[in-house]
Image (cartoon, helix red, strand yellow):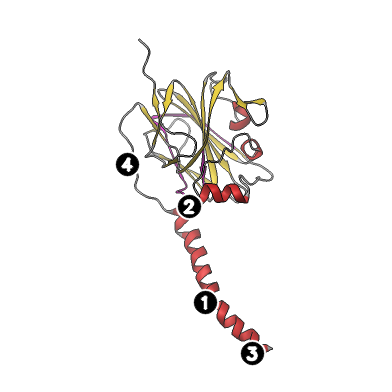
């Protein structure tokens, strides 16, 4: 019996060592990779704040978003967990959600030139998982579109909201997943950002919700893969003659 167990262990040991090396690589190298990104120089463009897949684009009216799933309106402040620094949430704009899988780069970047007017962090007693196993497979491996709007994690999980004011006003909401344990921030209130500048790093799976208050034309849609500091996601609309 002992000889049998030793033979089994000898066979499993190489497999265990391989998986251990893979996990170590993912933990120490893959999650922290920092590729060079070339940001478009067109000031009319807003670039993606992170790598990932677009999971929803929603219109904001009077500071609220209509949830088709829940059949009710969600206030901007329920997602940002913070009031606008000027004291009043801008009325009309857009919300775009980008899901970051463990396969994506996990740095977050400034979507445009502007000044940081506020940074608010809100913890949570328990972070809910963002997706179920089938949604995870579709998003991460099959790269299929999955609408995640109005799920509980988007309203309850730990988050950090960065308010930026430039040619338009934006709020970048970094939402933590169940297994995320750290958000590192590289900027401060009143800093002036250049387009594509690193703002933070959020570990493992996570999501960035970007509120845009101003007239823009979207260049991406649900299901599109985007890359932080590189992919144009919207263009400022030209004033009507």
Dot 2: element: loop
The count of marks equals: 4
Cα separation between marks 4 and 1: 41 Å
Residue 40 can be seen, yes or no:
yes
Q: What segment is highlighted magenta in the picture?
A: 98-121
- Picture coordinates of residue 68, whole percent (x, y): 63, 28
- Picture coordinates of residue 27, whole percent (x, y): 50, 59
Residue 111 falls within the magenta-colored stretch = yes
Circle 3: is it few (<14), some (14-19), or many (20+) Cα within 10 Å?
A: few
Residue hosting label 1: 14
Cα separation between marks 2 and 1: 25 Å
Residue hosting label 4: 38
Residue hosting label 2: 103
Cα separation between marks 2 and 4: 20 Å
**Residue drawn 56% across the image and 41% down it:** 146
- Sequence order check, earlier mark of 1 and 3: 3
Left or right placement of residue 23 versus residue 235 in this view = right
Residue 220 falls within the magenta-colored stretch = no
Q: Nearer the viewer, residue 182 or 107?
A: 107
Q: Which mark is residue 3?
A: 3
């Amino acid at each position: 019996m002992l000889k049998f167990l030793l033979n089994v262990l000898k066979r499993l040991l190489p497999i265990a060592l391989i998986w251990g090396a893979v996990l170590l690589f993912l933990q120490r190298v893959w999650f922290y990779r920092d590729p060079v990104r070339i940001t478009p120089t067109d000031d009319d463009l807003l670039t993606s704040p992170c790598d990932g897949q677009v999971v929803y684009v929603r219109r904001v009216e009077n500071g609220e978003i209509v949830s088709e799933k829940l059949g009710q309106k969600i206030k901007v402040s329920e997602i940002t967990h913070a009031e606008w620094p000027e004291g009043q949430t801008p009325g009309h704009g857009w919300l775009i959600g980008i899901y970051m899988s463990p396969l994506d780069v996990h740095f977050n970047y400034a979507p445009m030139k502007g000044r940081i007017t506020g940074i608010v962090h809100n913890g949570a007693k328990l972070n809910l998982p963002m997706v179920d196993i089938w949604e995870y497979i579709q998003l991460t491996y099959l790269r299929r579109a999955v609408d995640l709007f109005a799920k509980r994690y988007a309203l309850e999980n730990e988050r950090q909201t960065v308010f930026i004011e430039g040619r338009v006003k934006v709020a970048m909401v970094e939402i933590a997943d169940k297994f995320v344990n750290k958000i590192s921030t590289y900027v401060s209130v009143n800093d002036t950002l250049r387009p594509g500048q690193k703002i933070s790093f959020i570990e493992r799976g996570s999501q960035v919700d970007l509120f845009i208050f101003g007239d823009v034309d979207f260049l991406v849609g649900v299901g599109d893969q985007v890359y932080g500091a590189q992919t144009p996601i919207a263009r400022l609309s030209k004033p009507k003659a």
